[in-house]
């Protein structure tokens, strides 16, 4: 069984790889390599916007959409759910990093949204929520007339 | 989303040339466990579809690289994960049958099953008493 310890050696190699990427093109990346491990809040989110919508990309791999619950109250969005992982009982474990169990996250949307038109799509483990901005929160173009 | 079969690159075939290393890379969380039949590796790769996944084995080192699809043009307000992708390497033990790896990607979760080489499987030896 001693052969399995090589996994640990590879970990140090991974840190070396991290260093290589950090030096790439003289660009300084985030101080700590953005690792999915040890994330403070689950799930991780990215928020984007364009003229009409806010978009929330949420990393929730390996979940059935029916185990997800989403609600909007004013401009607060709550995502909750449970990730279930079936784990073999009679196995020897070498790594067990994937998180399992209940999660909940509340996100404040920076402007008023239209709660009736919020849409969510789940693909490849990413939940993308599209939230149309309320009419009042959209930028308006004001025509300037030259007299 | 149905089950997808993936092909695994064999030794000697290098991963495609890196042209875009900007942005931050993420280390995917993995589960690795072993049974009498083989080794199973499960990796969380949210955002990665079949086209963005590249698996390679070279000299017993397994490389998992995943590139998520690019988001449509929009302004980023808040970011907790990088857009570049996932990268992680593992040294595989040498008692595995690397020709028979099965890879499966579903809902952003990669499952790799590597059977043990026949010689490495435990065998029950009957003892007959004369």
Image: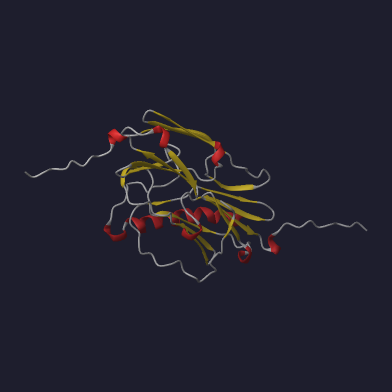
Question: In which quadrant will I find the C terminus of chain A?
Answer: top left
Name the residue furthest right.
B130
Name the residue furthest front.
A147
Viewer-proximal residue, B42 or A68? A68
Tell me the colour scheme of the image: secondary structure
Viewer-proximal residue, B63 or B17? B17
Q: Give the residue displayed 56% in from the left and 38% down from the top.
A: A66
Q: Position of residue A78 (x, y in %)?
A: 44, 32
Viewer-proximal residue, B31 or A137? A137
Answer with left or right where residue B79 lies relative to residue A82: left
Q: Position of residue B97 (x, y in %)?
A: 64, 64
Task: Indicate whether A98 appears above or below B15.
Answer: above
Q: Position of residue A35 (x, y in %)?
A: 42, 47
Q: How many marks?
A: 0
Q: Give the residue displayed 73% in from the left and 56% down from the top.
A: B122
Tell me which corner region of the image, top left, top right, bottom left or bottom right, holds residue A133. Answer: top left
Q: Position of residue A112 (x, y in %)?
A: 32, 32
Answer with left or right where residue A123 lies relative to residue B113: left
Question: In which quadrant will I find the N terminus of chain A?
Answer: bottom right
Q: Give the residue displayed 65% in from the left and 59% down from the top.
A: B115
Q: Give the residue displayed 69% in from the left and 54% down from the top.
A: B36
Name the residue furthest bottom.
B12
Name the residue furthest left.
A147
Viewer-proximal residue, A32 or B50? B50
């Amino acid at each position: 069984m001693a052969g399995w310890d090589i996994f640990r050696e590879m970990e140090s190699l991974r840190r070396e790889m991290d260093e290589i990427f950090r030096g790439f093109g003289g660009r300084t990346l985030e101080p700590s390599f953005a690792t999915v491990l040890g994330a403070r809040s689950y799930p991780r989110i990215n928020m984007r916007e364009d003229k009409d919508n806010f978009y929330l990309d949420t990393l929730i791999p390996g979940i059935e959409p029916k185990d997800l619950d989403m609600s909007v109250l004013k401009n607060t969005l709550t995502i909750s759910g449970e990730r279930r992982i079936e784990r073999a009982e009679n196995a020897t474990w070498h790594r067990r990093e994937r998180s399992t169990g209940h999660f909940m996250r509340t996100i404040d949307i920076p402007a008023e949204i239209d709660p009736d038109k919020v849409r969510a799509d789940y693909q490849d483990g990413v939940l993308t929520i599209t939230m149309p901005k309320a009419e009042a929160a959209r930028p308006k173009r004001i025509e300037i007339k030259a007299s | 989303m149905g089950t997808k079969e993936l092909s695994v690159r064999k030794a000697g075939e290098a991963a495609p040339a890196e042209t875009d290393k900007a942005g931050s890379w993420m280390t995917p969380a993995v589960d690795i466990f072993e049974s009498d039949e083989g080794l199973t590796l499960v990796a969380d790769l949210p955002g990665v579809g079949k086209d963005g996944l590249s698996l390679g084995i070279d000299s017993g080192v397994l490389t998992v690289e995943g590139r998520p699809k690019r988001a449509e043009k929009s302004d980023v307000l808040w970011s907790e994960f990088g857009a570049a992708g996932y990268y992680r390497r593992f040294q595989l033990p040498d008692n595995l049958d690397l020709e028979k790896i099965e890879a499966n990607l579903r809902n952003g979760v990669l499952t790799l099953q590597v059977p043990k080489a026949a010689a490495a499987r435990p065998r029950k030896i009957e003892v007959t008493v004369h």
